[in-house]
């Protein structure tokens, strides 16, 4: 019998996918944010729209992640968070996140990013101080987790564009829907 | 004396830059296009906006290109077009273009792309038949060339999303401004 496949390393995973230049991505993302600010005017609306875009993207990316990473079932939220931080971020952005600040119940943690390709060359003007520039990322996490039956709330608690020393997203598991299998063992 | 540096190959150049996952880029670009369609309603306006975004991006990317590629002065429009096709496309999108269909004056040519990371998974609904989905690319070319003193008009003549067999952009040099050097030889 062939051995069960083991998950790839983050580096191997990142090397195995098609890639484009990070600066092109950064500038393209910046163009979206600028466009939304022009169109929507309200910073809160821009935050909402970026989160929704991220959610839609996350629900799609999870398929590529599962197909390429050889990750099958994570046993719990903790393992899922580690997998996203070490493999998911690496596979899509080329960087890794640190998982930290777990609560006692093991249902809330933080992803901390020190390197964030989304924000190269970005400076927020004074008029955009309420903007969560990277809200697309928290949306991606939320969307991807929902596809594997985990409902979450994701909020930014540190943001270098606002003068903090790192990027930190707080991820709270609010509901875990048991997966339904399309077959039964005794069929 | 150190030898003059020679331009890098497209592969070496692409390997030397920071990169992100192509699917993330594709989905992010798709999110912009969808947002613009929702906001602007008119397909012609969307085309115009994508071109303008591309122009802005192109004026920025040219700096990274010149800094990393070791390309210095191209002798004429023909060499410039070849450099964009072989090195520029490779450095940013990871694909190369073919330069073809030169006119007799050597001022108009086509870039043909068979592989185009922008359009993976994209299908245009019937309501978007006039959309130039990849207009950001033609804008990038126009913006980048303007930064090296070449005014161009760039139009799509073939588009696989419209049923053609490849992507073909027609690039017409309309004006070449002689470069002004910030110093004189006999200063």
Image: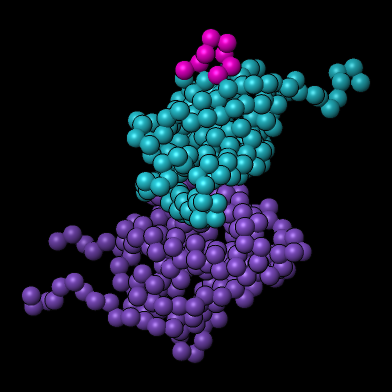
Chain colours: A purple, B cyan
| Residue at the farthest top position | B104
Residue B163's spot in the image, x, y percent?
A: 34, 35
B122 is higher (above) or lower (below) than A105: above
Quadrant containing the N terminus of chain B is top right
Residue placed at 52% from the left, 13% from the top? B103
Q: Is residue A79 magenta?
A: no
Residue B87 visible somewhere in the drawing: no
As drawn, the residue found furthest toward the left would be: A187
Which is more toward the observer, B160 or A164?
A: B160
Q: Magenta segment, which residues?
A: B101-108
Q: Position of residue B74 (x, y in %)?
A: 64, 21
Q: Quadrant of residue A120?
A: bottom right
Residue B177 seen by the camera: yes
Magenta stretch, main secondary structure class:
loop
Residue A186 position by quadrant: bottom left
Instruction: Name the residue: 84% across, 27% down.
Output: B182
Residue ID at (49%, 78%): A153
Compared to A44, does B18 lie above or below?
above
Q: Going by the picture, which residue comes out furthest to the right?
A: B187
**Along the viewing direction, whichever of A71 and A46 lies nearer the viewer:** A46
B151 left or right of B180? left
Query: Compared with residue A116, is residue B187 higher up or lower down, i.e. above or below?
Result: above
Question: Foreground residue, B164 or A122?
Answer: B164
Q: How many marks?
A: 0
Residue A58 % position (x, y): 43, 63
Residue B108 falls in which quadrant of the image? top right
Residue drawn at x 12%, y 76% as measured from the top left? A185
């Amino acid at each position: 019998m062939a051995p069960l496949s083991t998950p790839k390393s983050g580096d191997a995973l990142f090397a195995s996918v098609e890639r484009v230049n990070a600066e092109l991505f950064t500038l393209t993302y910046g163009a979206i944010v600028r466009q939304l600010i022009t169109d929507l005017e309200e910073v809160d609306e821009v935050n909402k729209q970026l989160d929704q875009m991220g959610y839609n993207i996350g629900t799609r990316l999870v398929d590529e992640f599962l197909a390429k990473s050889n990750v099958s079932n994570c046993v719990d939220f903790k393992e899922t968070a580690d997998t996203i931080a070490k493999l998911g971020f690496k596979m899509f952005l080329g960087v890794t996140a640190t998982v930290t600040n777990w609560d006692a119940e093991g249902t809330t943690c933080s992803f901390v990013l020190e390197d964030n390709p989304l924000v190269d060359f970005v400076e927020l003007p004074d008029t955009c101080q309420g903007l969560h520039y990277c809200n697309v990322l928290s949306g991606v996490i939320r969307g991807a987790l929902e596809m594997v039956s985990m409902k979450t709330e994701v909020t930014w608690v540190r943001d270098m564009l606002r003068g903090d020393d790192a990027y930190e997203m707080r991820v709270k598991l609010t509901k875990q829907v048991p997966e339904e299998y399309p077959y039964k063992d005794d069929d």
